[in-house]
Image: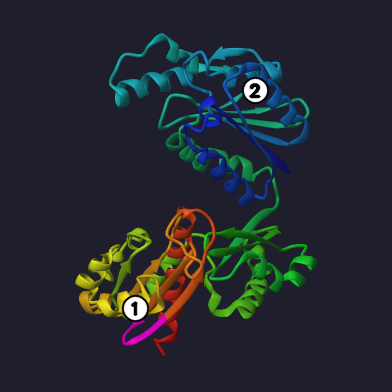
Amino acid sequence: MVTELISVGTEILLGNITNTNARYLAEQCAALGLSCYYQVTVGDNPDRLEGALRQALKRSDVVILTGGLGPTNDDLTKEITAKVLGKNLAEDAHTRECIEAYFKTTMHRVITDNNWKQALVPEGAVVVDNRNGTAPGLIMETDDNKTVILLPGPPNELYPMFEQDIRPFLSRLTKEVIYSRTVKIGGLGESFVAAQIKDMLDSQTNPTIAPYAKTGEVHLRVTARAQSVEMAKKMIRPVLKELKHRFGINIFATHEEVTLEDKLISMLKKREWTITTAESCSGGLLSGRLINVAGASDVINQCFVTYANEAKHALLGVKNHTLKKHGAVSPQTARAMAKGAAKAAEADVAISVTGIAGPGGGTEEKPVGLVYIGCYVRGYIEVMECHFSGNRAKVREATVARAIDFARRCVIRYSK
């Protein structure tokens, strides 16, 4: 069964807000076994909205529209949908009561006349109560067995409504489910990963494997379509086993919600080790990403941003001789930074970063994008030389991702 998402709102087209609703609904529909082939964003324009809806009904079985259900004149989703389906609008007494109760108990203010516009519903529509706002959801069937669903735009209204009412409704429309697992690989490029599984990609049917490139990572989404979640999991299991066999230590997670930094922090917690960072070109981006993990305070006491040579010497004990002879961007300095940070913070693990993020500062010998990453693990030290491309932001982001993955590998290596 094919579903289509139509997001309504000029503010989305202008980039004023991020369309998180489309992502959420796409994931939910996929999990229900609904194939989402099209996603459309249209502004608050009646003619263009009507055209988008008519086209969607020609090519899709289920059309879900979000936004444009408010009380103002430019909220036209319900009116245009009624026009397309040939339905008249009439006030729904139950919805009017819900709106009145919401204003009295939650808003604590007088209801303006335009709010009653939200109590108008197309004839024959199933009204879905909005427990977190005033615009109800609507479910409508067409004469040719198509389904149109209207949902409010605010995520804090849409998500609960979908969970409580829309998902159970949609689950009755299809006999299949789609289940996915994500294999996350660090430190390898997308083309290399794809080459390693070319035979699997060429012969795939169900389950399927879809590679996605992220900064410093490659994700392989393994998806199966089956009659039940249990059956889909069983189908995916041998594929996951084969991917683990091929990529080994390069895999850091097999669940979508686990990030690279999550994995590193959990490994340190398990060993009851602490970690610190010593950053130059990344300027705190590395420590910030680690600290984003809930519970990071269990393994992080302090971190260092040592952008200038004087700071490297004063805070980390990097010798002036090392800085003068080899330079700030060198394997020797990265090694000294990692060792010095571990000592200063009394940490079991330390990651150091020093490089040239650009756009200036590069030379023929040391070009922009050259980065050295050091990792200290309980007396052992390794240094990695990296060459990144892109602008300053991309170099810094790639550096951080590689540094976290490098630390993960070193912790595994020196835990034995």
Residue at 38% x, 69% y: name it. 353
Circle 1 packing at 10 Å, graded few (<14), some (14-19), many (20+), is: few
Q: How many marks?
A: 2
Circle 2 packing at 10 Å, graded few (<14), some (14-19), many (20+), is: many
Tell me the number on the disc at residue 277: none
Q: Dividing the picture into quarters, in which one does residue 121 lie?
A: top right
- Residue linked to disc 2: 49
From the viewer's perspective, tell me whether residue 262 is left or right of residue 119: left
Q: Dividing the picture into quarters, in which one does residue 4 lie?
A: top right
Look at the image and tell me whether residue 181 can be seen. Answer: yes
Compare residues 173 and 294 and report the one nearer the observer.
Answer: 294
Residue at 64% x, 12% y: name it. 88
Q: CA distance from mark 1 to mark 2?
A: 66 Å
The magenta span reads: 376-382
Where is residue 362 shown, x and y percent of the image? 46, 62
Q: Magenta-highlighted stretch: main secondary structure?
A: strand
Query: Quarter of the image containing the C terminus?
Result: bottom left
Compare residues 47 and 361 and report the one nearer the observer.
Answer: 361
Q: Is residue 132 above or below residue 236?
A: above
- Residue linked to disc 1: 325
Compare residues 395 and 184 and report the one nearer the observer.
Answer: 395
Let me know if residue 139 is in the magenta part.
no
For mark 1, give the secondary structure.
Answer: helix
Residue at 32% x, 59% y: name it. 284
> Which colour assignment does the render follow?
rainbow
Where is residue 99 shown, x and y percent of the image? 41, 21
Q: Amino acid at mark 1?
A: Lys
Where is residue 147 shown, x and y percent of the image? 68, 32
Residue closest to the far bottom: 416
Residue closest to the far top: 113
Answer with mark 1 or mark 2, whichever residue precedes in sequence: 2
